[in-house]
Amino acid sequence: MSKPKILVARAVFPETIARLSQHFDVESNQADETWSKAELARRLADKVGAFTTGSDRIDAEVLAAAPHLKICANMAVGYNNFDVPAMTARGVLATNTPDVLTETTADFGFALLMATARRMTESEHYLRAGKWTKWSYDMFAGSDIHGATLGILGMGRIGQGIAKRGAHGFGMNVIYHNRSRLSAELETECKARYVSKEELLKTADHLVLVLPYSAASHHTIGAAELAQMKPTATLVNIARGGIVDDAALAAALKNQQIAAAGLDVFEGEPSVHPDLLTVPNVVLTPHIASSSVPTRLAMANLAADNLIAYLTTNKPITPLNPEVLAA
Ligand code: 8YV
């Protein structure tokens, strides 16, 4: 009997391909070519499953070209590349990779915060450029992490991980805002106090964004919000491009309306707003918050396991639209 056909839309660990190949006839993109949406749709025409990443858009148009498709397994916890209602309407299961990346991503969020507040990349560029000729009393003087007020916008698993690092590791005063308030037990565990968005913006010394992207969270931080922040504040975005209005942020950094920003995600990435590339008080990284070797492997394996579990036993591990199963 021939094996079911699946598509792996981007290059992944060879061991993940090998694992999938035990169950499926795998077409993979190990060359890591950049496929257009039309190309992705064309390759999905005869597939029952797809292994996707955040760069692969699955919407009604793609689904219309993939009549046999039963599941798209995203190697990401975020899934704004999926039109989930369109997938549900077509009976296509969506899965993501929660939990396995929480601690690694929280580590990175904290690292980016520290690099930003303490001006690490700016000072490194200065040193590499041969400009360091003497000690100065205020050389790259930044802001403190310990004892400062850490604001977190979006208090899911990753936000909680950052809160715990700040509160327990660095003695920070942690405040947060979220669509829904955490239980009293979780607030105690994270040593975090719930505040309004306005209070968060006004009182945070360091504001970290960890909320999911949707039409509702588009430009959650724009010119008006940046204007409410302290002039000494730092802003860190490890969530998604589009949550911050990058043009407004570049202007705020240029005018020193806020002190600095650390950005791992960008509107329209991998393109980066040109003004962000010219301001010195910003640390820029190419969407790597989850990128430790063990975590990326765990994410790939969970996406693969979702494909295997659903297509062989009908029991996916981390479904996003379980109503498809009931139907
Ligand atoms: C991924 C991420 O690297 O999991 C997420 O939501 O943003 C990252 O961990 C990226 O989306 C690739 O799929």
Image (cartoon, helix red, strand yellow):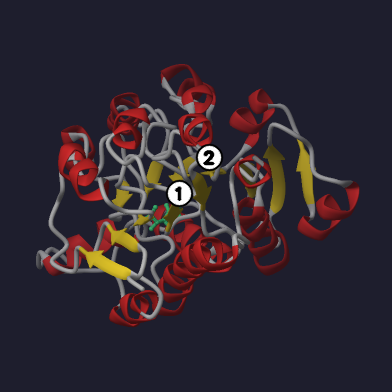
Query: Which quadrant of the frame does ligand 1 lie within?
Result: bottom left
The quarter of the rendered structure image containing the C terminus is top right
Single out the residue that lies furthest toward the right: 184
Res. 73 image quadrant: bottom left
Image location of residue 141, percent across then percent down:
39, 55
Q: Identify the amino acid type marked 2.
A: Pro
Image location of residue 123, percent across then percent down:
27, 61
Task: State which tag comes first along the sequence, 1 or 2.
Answer: 1
The quarter of the rendered structure image containing the N terminus is bottom left
Q: Identify the amino acid type marked 1.
A: Lys
Task: Check the image and report above or below for 76 versus 297.
Answer: above
Single out the residue that lies furthest toward the front: 1
In terms of secondary structure, where does tag 1 sit?
loop
Res. 62 image quadrant: top left
Residue drawn 65% across and 23% down? 198
Image location of residue 253, percent across then percent down:
33, 33
- Tag 2 residue: 212
- Tag 1 residue: 70
The one of 118 and 197 positioned closer to us in this rendering: 197
Q: Is mark 2 within 8 Å of ligand 1?
A: no
Single out the residue that lies furthest toward the top: 224
The one of 98 and 251 positioned closer to us in this rendering: 98
Left or right: residue 60 versus residue 298 is left
In terms of secondary structure, where does tag 2 sit?
loop
**From mark 1 to mark 2, how far is it between C-alphas?**
25 Å
Residue drawn 64% across and 64% down? 165
Residue drawn 14% across and 51% down? 34
Res. 152 image quadrant: top right
The one of 4 and 96 positioned closer to us in this rendering: 4
